[in-house]
Image: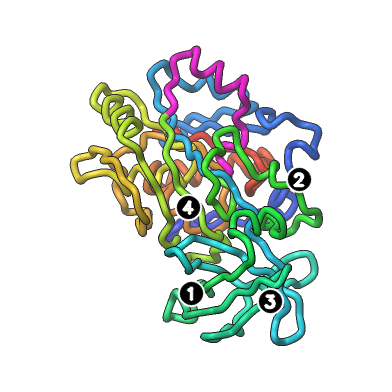
Amino acid sequence: MNITKDSIIQFNLPGHLACPLPSEDRGLQRDEVRLLVTECDGREINHAKFKAIHEWLLPGDVLVVNTSATRPSALPVSLPTGGHGMLHLGNKLNANEWLIEIREIVGNKTIRWKGGENGLVFQLPDEAFVTLKKRFYKDHKMLDLWHAEISAKQGLGAYLGDHALPIKYDKLDKRYPLSYYQTFFSFHSGSAEMPSAGRGFTPDLVEKLQKQGVIFAPILLHTGVSSLEEDETPYPEYMEINPVSASIINTAKSQGRRIIAIGTTAIRAIESASTMDGIVRPYRGNTSLFIEQHYTMKIADGLLTGFHEPRASHLHMLQSLAGFEHIEKAYMAAIDGKYYWHEFGDLHLILT
């Protein structure tokens, strides 16, 4: 493994670890995926099954969980070039406009399609259509996202349920049903892609943790399309933190108990809603917060997350939470231990 110290951790990810099948297709229960636990600047490293996570949690720990559910967000389109593409529906901007991405199908994967222009219309199934209004970013080197208006004969939720598919992860030949992209906490439909850190939780495991005295604080953050490439920062996403969850988190912090975010979405939400003096406020609206490696965490003491690709923007967040040395040692251990990457892969509990 070759890791070099730079502004962000760099490493070579072996291809056979990059994109596993879902646990269900590997003969595993969801809570039987592997769990890497790293503590104390990465000096303490433990290997376990995810269902043993209770061994590292204490009564009074607060787990912040994202209740966003994945909606089918991929629709087939024909490109003006004659090729086949997919429209990925991201965040809702207002009553009529959405943030979307058009991707070209190449083999068993999709790549960014660069040929959009204002006013371009794509036909969708069942006489629906989408019109590109304007680019989201003026800099064409950034994500090719578009403000777009979608017209359909039925409500969009029903339309997507009838005609759209879950966004397919690259390198997986097979498409999976929407249920594979939901977690135990999925309740409010709205994410383009799964908030995947919660995928290992099962009803039995949640009940076990509650009996142990672990507290769950639900928040909501709807993920957009997440085809970010090297060093690209996340864009605005809709989030909500209700007054009860804010109070749960603030009370725990005041008593010196740990706040552990389940997923990078949960960290982004609670840090977005926090004041400079570390108080979480109820919040409803978009967040544009990008947590880079020099950001000082105000709320989170730990994070459960998957493993992120080389130079992924989420690595900045991990380094902000735990520091370069901790994440370097963790990722060395993960590659040496043959942990699986990506949304259907293994999990990493970071405790600071």
Amino acid at circle 3: Gln
Q: CA distance from mark 2 to mark 1?
A: 30 Å
- Of residues 245 and 196, the one drawn nearer to the viewer in this rendering: 245
Tell me the amino acid under the disc marked 2: Leu
Q: Categorize mark 4 by other alpha carbons within 10 Å: few (<14), some (14-19), many (20+).
A: many
Is-magenta flag for residue 213? yes
Q: Position of residue 83 (x, y in %)?
A: 76, 80
Q: Residue at x 80, y 39 (%)?
A: 25
Q: Earlier in the sequence, mark 3 or mark 4?
A: 3
- Crowding near the residue tagged with mark 2, few <14, some 14–19, many ≥20 C-alpha atoms within 10 Å: some
Q: Amino acid at mark 1?
A: Met
- Amino acid at the residue labelled 4: Leu
Mark 1 surroundings: few (<14), some (14-19) or many (≥20) residues within 10 A: few
On the rendered structure, is 199 left or right of 125?
A: left
Using the numbered discs, state the Cα–Cα distance from disc 3 to disc 4 in whole angstroms: 38 Å
- Principal SS element in the magenta part? helix
Residue beneath label 3, please? 123
Model colouring: rainbow
Which residue, given by chain and number where applicable, does mark 4 sit on?
Answer: 315
Q: Which residue position is annotated with label 1?
A: 142
**Residue on which disc 2 sits:** 21
Residue 241, placed above or below residue 79: above
The mark that comes first in sequence, 2 or 1, is 2
- The part of the chain drawn in magenta is 196-216
Q: Sequence-wise, which precedes: disc 1 or disc 3?
A: 3
Residue at image x 52%, y 85%? 118
Does 255 sit above or below residue 115?
A: above
